[in-house]
Amino acid sequence: MREVRQELKWADGKAIKNEVDLQVLDLLGPKTESDFSSQIKQTKKVKASKPDGDSTELTKDVEPIAVIDGKIAPAHMSISEIMKTKIHFHKPGENYKTDGYVVTPNTMKLLQEHLKLTRGQVRTRFPPEPNGILHIGHAKAININFGYAAAHDGICFLRYDDTNPEKEEEKFFLGIKDMVEWLGK
């Protein structure tokens, strides 16, 4: 609004604000209850009493919070905190509890062998495209795959696809490795 008022000094500010609000409403629709409940709270008014009985209103900085699904949560959480508290995948060996999981006569035996081999450790993998540079979608996948494993004391395998080794060049492997290491710092 400040930029508009500076550019259109002769225009009626109230009329401009009304038009902008109308255009936003037309574009996004009316605000919902969730728009109001997830707003971030950054300051808190605190009434402090002086020894002489005079009460003064003070503003005290508090950690920003957000209200998510009716629960108070920090407005900013690390990927590790999110993976520990918000993401609920099945535990190692409980794959068969997932909707649509095909159970065969050997399923339980194979899961038991797997658990014995991994000692119940969470194991994930990140399989990037072998002939390309990582993009923002890969960064999200890296956060989920490596982050979930780290949050649950597991490991994540960086898995290069080797289905067509004739066309794969070393520069791509090294580039992917460098980017994954950089993102992990």
Image: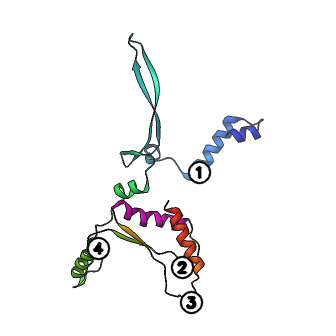
Looking at the image, residue 119 sits to the left or right of residue 172; the answer is: left
- Our reading of the magenta stretch's main secondary structure is helix
Give the residue at mark 3. Answer: 166
Task: Identify the element where label 2 is drawn.
Answer: loop
Residue depicted at x 51% and y 67%: 180
Horizontally, residue 30 falls left or right of residue 86, namely right
Which label's residue is closer to the chain start, 4 or 1? 1
**In the image as oriented, which residue stretches furthest toward the bottom?**
166
Categorize mark 3 by other alpha carbons within 10 Å: few (<14), some (14-19), many (20+).
few
43 or 114, which is in the foreground? 114
Q: In the displayed structure, does residue 121 sit left or right of residue 147?
A: left
**Mark 3 residue type:** Glu
Residue shown at the point (21%, 81%) measured from the top left: 109
In space, the residues marked 4 and 2 are separated at their CA atoms by 27 Å
The residue at which mark 2 appears reads as 130
CB within 8 Å, label 2 to label 1: no
Q: Earlier in the sequence, mark 2 or mark 1?
A: 1
Q: Position of residue 35 (x, y in %)?
A: 47, 46
Q: Residue flagged by tag 4: what amino acid is it?
A: Thr
- Mark 2 or mark 1: which is in front? 2
Residue identifier under label 1: 26
**Residue at the far right in the pictured view:** 10
Q: Earlier in the sequence, mark 4 or mark 2?
A: 4
Query: What segment is highlighted magenta in the picture?
Result: 136-152
- Residue tagged by mark 4? 118
